[in-house]
Amino acid sequence: MVLNGTAEKKAAGATANQLAEAFGKQLSLASRSVHADDYTNTHPAVAPPMHVSTTYRYSKNPDELVPWSDVDPAAEDDFYIYSREKSPTTTRYEAILSSVLGGPAVSYASGLAAFHAMIVFLNPKRVAIGGGYHGCHGILKLMKKLNGLEQLELEDENDLAKLQKGDVIHVETPLNPTGEARDLAYYRKKADELGCYLTVDGTFAPPPLQEPFKFGVDIVMHSGTKYFGGHSDMLSGVLAIHPDRAHGKDGSPGWLKELREERLHLGGVMGNFEGWLGVRSLRTLELRVKRQSESTQRLVDWLASQKKAGGNVVSDLVFKIQHSSQQPEASDPDSWLCKQMPNGHGPVFSLWLQSEEHAKRLPSKLFLFHHATSLGGVESLVEWRAMSDSTIDRRLVRVSIGVEGWEDLRDDLLQGLQALQAELKN
Ligand SMILES: *Cc1c(COP(=O)(O)O)cnc(C)c1O
């Protein structure tokens, strides 16, 4: 079995294009999650191997030797040289992600490594960003130290007007920690007017919930640590490139080649074990995310109806529920929100409790929800958000729904709120 044999690779499973041709249509997301990497099979084993090697043998045939400088990093069938460039296991992970995200995907060691690589690549003088994941703001601060990069407020029209050609509008949607959505079509229009790139942090609404490329987004970033990993056991970051940008035209190299070249020098590649775990996890992406989204909707609907009815423990202790399904546009099927999230809302929402004390004490009353940061795993989590993000109101509790039965989660929240109420009355 020769790893660096292109002929052998071609003879393995079908590529995405071959599958689409054979079926006369693009396969479903669920099928692509299981088969989009078939073309990388080089061994009869059905379960994917984990290649841990950092280095790869060159061809024994001197006539086949291609120096590294002549290798196109964007070519699908080229060979492996050194694992800081790429490795077979993470290539497999990227093959699935490219298919499910709808544009060539490049993986990184973490979500923040991906965000950093994106900013280094686009090299803007200004970035408009609003709220959202605090770590991305940390990267922009580092960039400011290096090159004076200016950070502008996304939701301030006067700030947006300061953007110039080549700058970046970065939209996190749905937003951390509230789970509320932002209008991508609106920001695409702004980006076009101003000559800016539009990038999206889509971590909170993985496929099948949202397809940012339909709205002309240039790069979609994900913290793969969340729903792609899905089991709270691996770090990963992903940049998916709009198909029109990925491959060069008129002699330009294309973003895929450039991002891969830059990743080689930034050095923020994923580990092989993480790549392997990622492949295992992506097989069930649609199953998990659909279930998590549906359970979340049921829970949020239940909480909202309790709050509206009044005279119960939810209405006594919770004064605000934030989630994209609670935004006014969510009830209008023609709204931008329903067009942007046609397959359901994300599995994260926030509860605002009556006081900081309530928010701090609720997590310890719950049995099924772990009190921990992060999200996207099969285990439901709550976090008194003040624990890890100093910029967030101290009455806010972030909730990430896992794959448990939703009625059990509802009962746990109910008993937790009751226990909290009893404790605070004493
Ligand atoms: C977790 C997260 C990140 C950072 O990802 P890491 O994998 O932890 O580096 C970025 N954006 C959002 C919205 C996140 O939730």
Image (tube, helix red, strand yellow):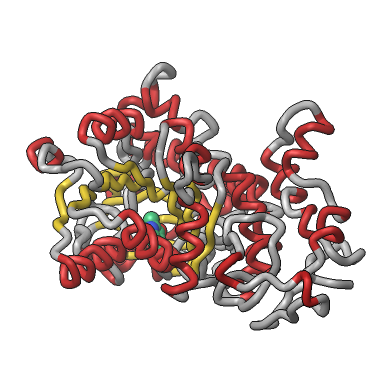
In percent of width and height, residue 176 lies at: 34, 53
In percent of width and height, residue 347 lies at: 48, 48
Quick check: which quadrant has ligand 1? Answer: bottom left
What residue is rendered at 69% in x and 62% in y? Answer: 78
Q: Please state if 10 lies on the left or on the right of 92 as rendered.
A: right
Residue lying at the far left of the rendered structure = 158
Q: Nearer the viewer, residue 274 or 105?
A: 105
Q: Nearer the viewer, residue 189 or 29?
A: 189
From this viewpoint, is residue 418 visible?
no
The quadrant holding residue 300 is top left
Q: Tell how many labels.
A: 0
Residue lying at the far front of the rendered structure = 63
What residue is rendered at 23% in x and 63% in y? Answer: 140
Q: Quadrant of the C terminus?
A: bottom left
Q: Quadrant of the N terminus?
A: bottom right
From this viewpoint, is residue 177 visible?
yes
Does 317 sit above or below residue 136? above
Residue lying at the far right of the rendered structure = 44
Q: Please state if 391 lies on the left or on the right of 328 as rendered.
A: left
In percent of width and height, residue 281 lies at: 66, 60
Does 71 sit above or below residue 306? below
In percent of width and height, residue 352 lies at: 27, 51
What residue is rendered at 42% in x and 31% in y? Answer: 215
What residue is rendered at 79% in x and 53% in y? Answer: 38
